[in-house]
Image (cartoon, rainbow, N blue to C red):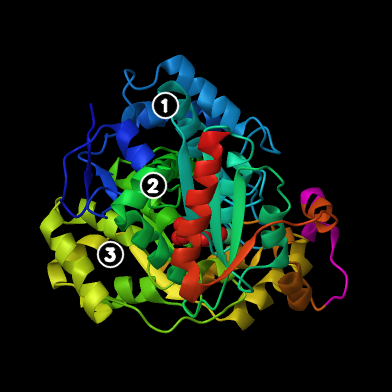
Amino acid sequence: MIKFVSNKGGGEAVDFETAILDGYAADGGLYVPERLPQISAEQLAQWKELSYKELAFEIMSLFIDREIISAKDLRSVIAQAYGTFEKDEVIPIPKLKSQENTYIMELFYGSTLSFKDIGLAFLVNLVDFFLQRKNKKLSIIVATTGDTGPAAASYIAGKSTMDAWVLYPKGMITEEQERQMTTLHHSNVHPVGVYNCPEGGDDLDVVIKKLYANQAFKEKVNLSSVNSINWGRIMIQTVHYFYGYLQIADTMGEGICMAVPSGAFGNLCAGGIARKMGLPIKTYIAAQNKNECLKRIFNEGVFSMAPIYETVSSAIDILVPMNFWRYLYFCVGGDTQKIKQWMEELDKNRTVRFDPKTWEAYREGYLSASVSDEKTMELIKTIFDAEGYLMDPHTAVALAVANKLKEDIGDCKVIVLATAHPSKFPQIIKQSLGVDSLPTAATHPSIEKAKVKSQKGYTADHTHLEDALLDAMENHWAQKETA
Ligand SMILES: Cc1ncc(COP(=O)(O)O)c(C=O)c1O
């Protein structure tokens, strides 16, 4: 049985169910499995013909003991999670016509049109399964830069076991993303638009950490989170890396490059873990906009927090790629004391310089670069004009960076992870294409429907957010208890 420990080394090792239901580890660290399952080349070859859902079942079975969830129940959680996706294959991977050797892995066919649906559809259903079995309820809190919030709210909506408290920086996400949360009228969904977040979504994470540290409150409302701090998100996100590879590689062992628009490093941490499990990815590209924290980590060996910029790829406007700390655990031989020291150093000084050995260990197989808003928008237009394929700005960041690093990547197939549907960013699409009305490719029926629905939600100022949440969450919990 694989046990789960904090990457900061505190507390006891816990079983899978506890790690999933807790979110954060007891010492404020991130849960990691004590060891990673290993996949042989023969095993990979046997998985070649599997559908996404079948593959998810195989890979999840390596992490989750049958005593915790039976094969039948795991299959049913996966079927329920992906049954509502728009495409039967869940993740289509078209090839670009206007560029050689380039594939787009479309991760945005879930209910809220971003790759967050891939992780949250599974995780929320799994949490619901555990809670029903335990006859327990949770208050789930998440912070969002625009896509996690809608996905969490949408999959939690109507579930009797959970409430979703979804914090977003007011004015820093698109109206379409906001409406995906505020037009859900279920009584267990509570969007909170937060004014005055100078550091965007990172400001909200700070408040969530404080709530977690408040033991009395945490116990009173059964607080948990499904942000990518939750191991379940990372674990299920390993599957799309395996799936993409198996779909596109001609032979098992072929070196392939994957380019990923990166913010909190949740997606790419899963990619790194998949490779450590045996997936033969030659190069991962951590693609960034003007907020270049990961670029500094990989290219300079320095984790430092610079001022945040608002960009056209707003979901990756992030200062602190939290999941880098989780990935590091697997690169330093599980040395939790070192990770704890570095995390504390970052909190204190806003910068950490890694020693050369550590830097070399974690950057192996990764490249990173950034791209300006101008180049991102230019590429959206170039590809649309050339072949009618429309990318959202985050996907465009990944493709632009992959093109920029062409020489370093060498001669191999490139899979670009398309993390959102363009209909979530209509203003940027219009600006990029230089048009007043949107092409059909930039529209989606669910976005159109949300435009004419009434909205509900809270607003709060960042300065009072902690108190406002303590009050609202405790009251709601008490009302539910007495109902
Ligand atoms: C559309 C989109 N692309 C990319 C990312 C970055 O993913 P991660 O934070 O896991 O690096 C996000 C996450 O916020 C997103 O919403």
Q: Is residue 390 visible?
A: no
For marks 2 and 3, give the one nearer the viewer.
2
Relative to the observer, which residue lies in front, 208 or 244? 208
For marks 1 and 2, give the one nearer the viewer.
2
Q: Magenta segment range?
A: 435-446
Task: Determine the image quadrant of residue 384.
Answer: bottom right
Q: With 150 as the anchor, is 413 left or right in this view? A: left
Q: Residue 456, how many percent across, how many down?
A: 71, 56
Q: Residue 251, how many percent across, how many down?
A: 43, 38
* Label 2 residue SS: loop
* Label 1 residue SS: helix
Task: Give the residue at x 43% y 21%.
Answer: 133
Q: Which residue is mark 1?
A: 58
Say which quadrant the C terminus sits in.
top right
> Amino acid under label 2?
Asn
Label 2 neighbour load within 10 Å: few <14, some 14-19, many 20+: many
Q: Which mark is residue 363?
A: 3
Tell me if residue 469 comes above or below residue 380 in the rendering. Answer: above
Q: Which residue is mark 2?
A: 230
Spatial distance from mark 1 to mark 2, Cα to Cα?
A: 20 Å
Q: With 132 as the anchor, is 428 left or right in this view? A: right
